[in-house]
Amino acid sequence: MYIIVGLGNPGREYGNTRHNIGWDVIDVLADRAHMDVLEKKHKAIIGKGVIAGQKCILAKPQTYMNLSGESVRELVDYYKIDEEMELIVISDDVSLEVGQIRIRKKGSAGGHNGLKSIIGHLGHDTFQRVKMGVGEKPKGYDLADWVLGHFSNEERKLMDDAAKRAAEAIELMITEGADVAMNRYNRKTEGTL
């Protein structure tokens, strides 16, 4: 069984922001697998179904970004998964260009508070993640304002395409493993800013 967690913040004001791109990917995965993500459990809204032939839980933590680890810890404990192999976390990344995706099997939080919380609650940084490039913060911008800001129309189109690619990458991670997915998706793609 896999637990796939998209990071984001609850509340209408956070919809379609850079920080909530993880939720967008969850929506694409749910749509592709004909799953509903509506059940409130483990400090998250979750859906259960089959993706790429494997039982999966899709989760959108409702703890706000900085406390994402609380929800992930509950999910991992309840479903008793191997968090190094069966947990996939989707987050925004300001060090990647808009529309770029990067798959990792471990690593630091890189300044991302949601990942920092998950690492703190798990007690290690060895779990699979899909980082979604949302572009570097412009000079003079506050980082929080940047990640809580909305995409331009051009960026939104790129991010919609990136969310579809991320969903495909996650399906490949499930069927063939993270290394195969990294080889295929960890390169600069046409149509990034």
Image (cartoon, rainbow, N blue to C red):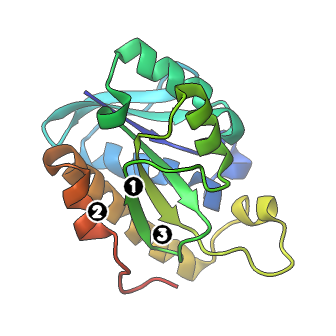
Is tag 1's residue or tag 2's residue first in the polypeptide sequence? 1
Say which amino acid is labelled 2: Met
Percent position of residue 109, x then y? 59, 49
Residue 44, can we see it? no
- Circle 3 Cα neighbour tier, 10 Å, few/some/many (<14 / 14–19 / ≥20): many
Question: Residue at (55%, 28%) from the top-left corner?
Answer: 123
Say which amino acid is labelled 3: Met
Marks 2 and 3, Cα distance to the nearest angstrom?
19 Å
Q: Is residue 162 left or right of residue 44?
A: left
User: Where is mark 2, residue-wise?
Assistant: 182
Task: Please tell me in which quadrant of the rendered image residue 85 appears.
Answer: top left
Is tag 3's residue or tag 1's residue first in the polypeptide sequence? 1
Question: Residue at (51%, 34%) from the top-left corner?
Answer: 124
Q: Nearer the viewer, mark 3 or mark 1?
A: 1
Q: Is residue 91 left or right of residue 29?
A: right
Is tag 2's residue or tag 3's residue first in the polypeptide sequence? 3
Dots 1 and 2: beta carbons under 8 Å? yes
Q: Is residue 191 left or right of residue 41?
A: left
Say which amino acid is labelled 1: Arg
Helix, strand or loop at mark 2: helix
Q: Is residue 62 above or below residue 155?
A: above
Percent position of residue 99, x then y? 47, 74
Q: Is residue 145 left or right of residue 79?
A: right
Marks 3 and 1, Cα distance to the nearest angstrom?
19 Å
Percent position of residue 108, x then y? 56, 50
User: Where is mark 3, residue-wise?
Assistant: 159
